Structure formats: structure tokens, C-alpha cells
Image (cartoon, grey):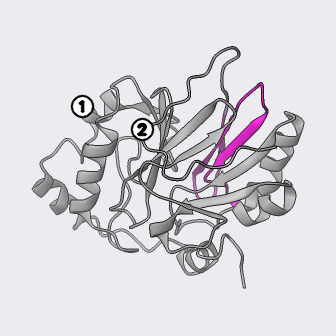
Amino acid sequence: MSRVLIAGARGCSVMATGRGLIFRQLFEPVSCTYTYLLADPETKEAVLIDPVLETANRDAKLVTELGLNMVYAANTHCHADHITGSGALKKLLTGCRSVISKDSGAMADIHIQEGDLITFGRYSLEARATPGHTDGCLTYVLNDGSMAFTGDALLIRGCGRTDFQQGCPNTLYRSVHSKIFTLPDSCHLYPAHDYTGQAVTTVEEEKRLNPRLTKSEAEFVQIMNNLNLPKPKQIDIAVPANLKCGVQD
């Protein structure tokens, strides 16, 4: 029987012993999206972070091959560049429930907010609200502080854009500095996307090397307001579908 998400459990931590966390980083090339599989090797309970519709069958196959029980498909936010695989995975994997921030405005089985925990076996992910790219952005932090999944809030040497979906550069700057850069310097950061072939960074690296977020807030706002990026190719399809857990009309 899967554990329930501990809604409202603030500041709790579950330390893991014995065999270590099962972790896989998976890639979808069209939208350059990373999907992350985390599982407890003893209880077999597992979580997928930011699944993509086109790779849902691949992810379900891997979960089955590893003998895991997928309890949650969790999104870091309502994506604009791809359709989430949450809805498809709920059909492919019995017992899987979708999770997203209640501030996202999107449908899901479970809505979470700042400080809530997603538990899977002896492990947990703490939700930290990191809005600015969208109102409903969350960063998921593993209970031992060794890794965090930043969605689009913080990318490797970059960050998510702030020119649509309730974006605000001031809010994003403060979110990253107060919720991500306050993690241990050694914490490994895993973004939702990467367009340059990199897979992981650390808090220390981004505090020192991120070309945008090492600036002052005023400089950051100026940079973000002058990016002049093209509209995401799938936004008109992805956002309406993602507001309904990845279900297309």
C-alpha cells in the first residue's frame, strides 16, 4: 500500500538507511525536457518528476522493468513547452496519482504548497514555492538536502523566462535567492530543461557562475525584460492540456 502525501507536514525529514536511492535522469529531445525517476529500493515506491506525454510509455516500461510501484507523477509547474505525461501514466501504472502546486490553477489528484512533503518509502521531497516563471512553480528538495529539482525556475547557467504565464522577474529573482541558493552549496540541482547538453549543476556553481542570477535584482530584471524570445512552439496546445493533467480535447 502506498504512503499518502503528507499535506502540511512542515519541517519533517525522513532519513534513509540501507541501500541508496534509485535515481534515473531521462530525456525528451523535442522539448529538451528532463524527467526524473526516484524510488526507494526497499519499499519500491517511486516518484516521477516532470513526465512528458511522448515518453510516458518509455517511463512506464522502465518503472515496470525495475519492479517499482509508481505512487506519484509530480510536475514542477504547468509547462508551456510540452504536454505532461501525468494523465497517460495514471492509465499505464495502477495507483499513480498526479501532483502539482495548488497555485498552478491546473487539475491534479493532489495539490500541494510550500512545505508539503511527497513521501515514497523512507524518502521524501519537500515542496518549496519558487514562483516567477509561473505562479505555480515548485522546487522539490530531497530530504537529506543532497539534490533538488528546480523545474524552470533555475536552469544550468540560466533560468526560466518571465514574459508569459504570470511571469515576474522580481519574483523569480527572490525565489531563487531565498529558496534555492539557501540550500547547501554541495546540493546537486536538476532542472526541467537543458539546451546545451549539461545534466546537473550545484548550488555553489550557480551562485558563482550563473550569468543572470549573480547580478543585482535590478540588473536581472533588465536582462529578463529584454530577452525577446520567440513564443514556445507548443504553448497553445500544451498549456490547455496541462491545465487538465495532460488531457487533450
The answer to whether 53 is drawn above or below residue 37 in the figure is below
Q: Under tag 1, what secondary structure?
A: helix
Q: Is residue 51 left or right of residue 199?
A: right
Q: Is residue 150 visible?
A: no
Residue 216 sits inside the magenta stretch: no
Q: Which residue is mark 1?
A: 208
In percent of the image, x 72 and y 40: which residue is there? 46
Tell me which segment is drawn in magenta.
24-52
Q: Which residue is mark 2?
A: 11
* Residue farthest bottom in this picture: 249
Disc 2 marks a residue whose amino acid type is Gly
How much space separates mark 2 and mark 1, taking CA atoms?
28 Å
Q: Is 187 or 125 nearer to us in this picture?
A: 125
Which badge, 2 or 1, comes first in the chain's sequence? 2
Q: Is residue 58 visible?
A: yes
In the picture, the quarter occupied by the N terminus is top right
Crowdedness near tag 2: few (<14), some (14–19) or many (≥20) residues, C-alpha within 10 Å: few
